[in-house]
Image (cartoon, grey):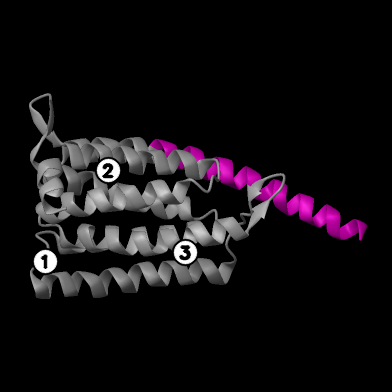
Amino acid sequence: MQVVAEWLLGNGITVLGQKISWAELVGQLCALAVVFLAQRRWVATWPVQVSATVLLFAVYASAHLGGLAVRQVVILLISVYGWWAWTRRSDPVYGVAIRKASGVERLVLIAVLAAGTSAFALLLTALDASWAPWPDAWIFIGTGVAFWAQGRGLVEFWLVWLAVDAVGVPLQIASGLYFSAAIYLVFAGLVVHGWWTWTRTARAQRDRTGAVTATE
């Protein structure tokens, strides 16, 4: 397994003078596919995400970005939960049941983002696990929150992803991971479209549920 990981990290392609390892290339393409699949609320979102986490863990660990590396482990665990949750909450007309978060849920998301980022940044600093602990921590906590909210079917998970991308792009560039930075920019465009799609679907599901309730 270690030999395979070393080969994936040590080999790849060169684009505009920048080396892109196979691990980074395939991992980020899988991550990009996850956004596309999530827009359509397909359960295949989660097994593809598992593949991305395995490859990107190796990429970020080799770049000495502890937060980004460890977040892949967290994403893997949340992906298992999301896979299970989406399989259980399937609507015959609209696919996975989704909705907007309540006021309390939004406050909880914000609180977790703020407190979690602060705590994890201090931990990364103490362990000397990242050369950029605060943005690294923001991306780590934001990713966990976004995937958890996605598993719950909350429309706001797309907005959390936008906040993650806003920090992720400059951090990837500063780390020399230019391909990953470009992928993050593509993510941002897909995320905006995903938020619009989920908002429209959530409204349709809410109206449909209300109409069914009114006729009972």
Q: What amino acid type should be assigned to the residue bearing mark 1?
A: Ala
Label 2 SS? helix
* Residues shaded magenta: 189-216
- Mark 2 or mark 1: which is in front? 2
Residue drawn 20% across and 41% down?
Answer: 24
Farthest residue to the top: give it: 16
**Toward the viewer: 66 or 7?**
7
Q: Which residue is mark 1?
A: 129
Q: Is residue 66 above or below residue 52?
A: below
The percent coordinates of residue 133 (x first, y second) are: 16, 63
Q: Residues within 10 Å of mark 3 (few under 14, many from 20)?
A: some
Question: What type is the residue that disc 3 sits on?
Answer: Tyr
| Marking on residue 81 | 3
Estimate the x, y position of residue 175 in percent, counting from the top left: 12, 47
Q: Earlier in the sequence, mark 2 or mark 3?
A: 2
Res. 27 mark: 2
Crowdedness near tag 2: few (<14), some (14–19) or many (≥20) residues, C-alpha within 10 Å:
many
